[in-house]
Amino acid sequence: MKKLYLIVILLLFWSSFGWTYHIEVLQISNISAYDETYDGFIEELAKNGIEQEENLTINRHIIDADAEAGLWKKVGILLKIKTTTSKIVDARPDLVLTVSTPGTKYSMNKLIGAGIPVVFTCVANPPLLGCPSVAEPIVGITGATLYIDPFTLMAIVQTVKPDIKKIGIIHSDDDNAVAFADESRIKATRLGISIITKQLEKSDDIKPAALELINNGIEAFAIPLDQYYGLRNLEPAIDIIAVASEHKIPIFSFANFDQKGALVYVGSEFKHNGILAARQAVKILKEGAKPEDLPILKQEELNISVDLGVASELGIDIPQHMLDAAKKL
């Protein structure tokens, strides 16, 4: 009995004073949105008693995937992901946070195979990882998604401007953006809207593509979740806003970024996505939950912002119920 009592005391002492959680972070692309996500993750962990300089060791690995990445550089990025993943496996962390679809997609099998729980964030389409749906995890991995049904987004476009029938989407080979463009083309037809898409390399200038779509008769631009728009200090976002403004064409941004000029912004907060990922991590680390038993989380209430200055310039009257629900810029 005395022996059992001593063991209990030692366990309590260790859990109070000696237990340290070890998390490794694998992130692809060095963009400000991912900094917001990481901040949300760290802050939420701290709220749940897992805090740096107290009981948390966390290492963040950022693999830069810049706008000039041609074929060979992309191969190099994949090799860096594999090398970094191997280092993470060797470190034997309690959990790995993967940031972005590529960061998750090209590391998850090795991490899961090593028995390390994985939580992802900034993944807009979990089925691209092999998940059965946007809400269902698979063995060894769960997370927080930025997914929003394109049908919902196109319905918002139609609410704001009912006469829009043709929308242009310019995107890169970003997995999330390609999936969004494909799904939008299918679902928009149910609303009588046709989607015209144009795919670019991440190093391409957006202005010629924007002018091409305007010449093809588009009546609005939609900006998808796409790393392309966040690269080069938001240069593509700034340029498409300038072209659209010159031609009096509204922009509906389905990604929240710090660049004014779109008519309407709809999306999830990157910081909140990090918060949701942290909640998954807490359940795994503190409660012993298995990733496959935790449904993928997403922000339920969308952030909607309306730029009244742009609306005035374009002569668009935003419906009152939309104004009531939206933040005014």
Image: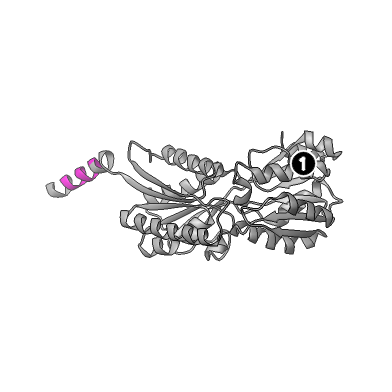
Q: How many marks?
A: 1
In the displayed structure, would residue 306 be above or below residue 102? Answer: above
Residue behind mark 1: 322
In the displayed structure, would residue 133 be above or below residue 124? Answer: below
Q: Residues within 10 Å of mark 1 (few under 14, many from 20)?
A: some
Specify the quadrant of the image occupied by residue 269.
top right
From the viewer's side, name the closer residue of 186 and 48.
Answer: 186
Where does the magenta region start and end? 6-13
| Residue 146: x %, y % from top left | 59, 51
How does the figure colour the protein chain or chains? one colour
State left or right for residue 19 relative to residue 64: left
Residue found at the very far left of the displayed protein? 2
> Could you tell me if residue 26 is visible in this image?
yes
State which quarter of the image contains the C terminus: top right
Q: Residue at x 34, y 47 (%)?
A: 22
Callout 1, which amino acid? Met
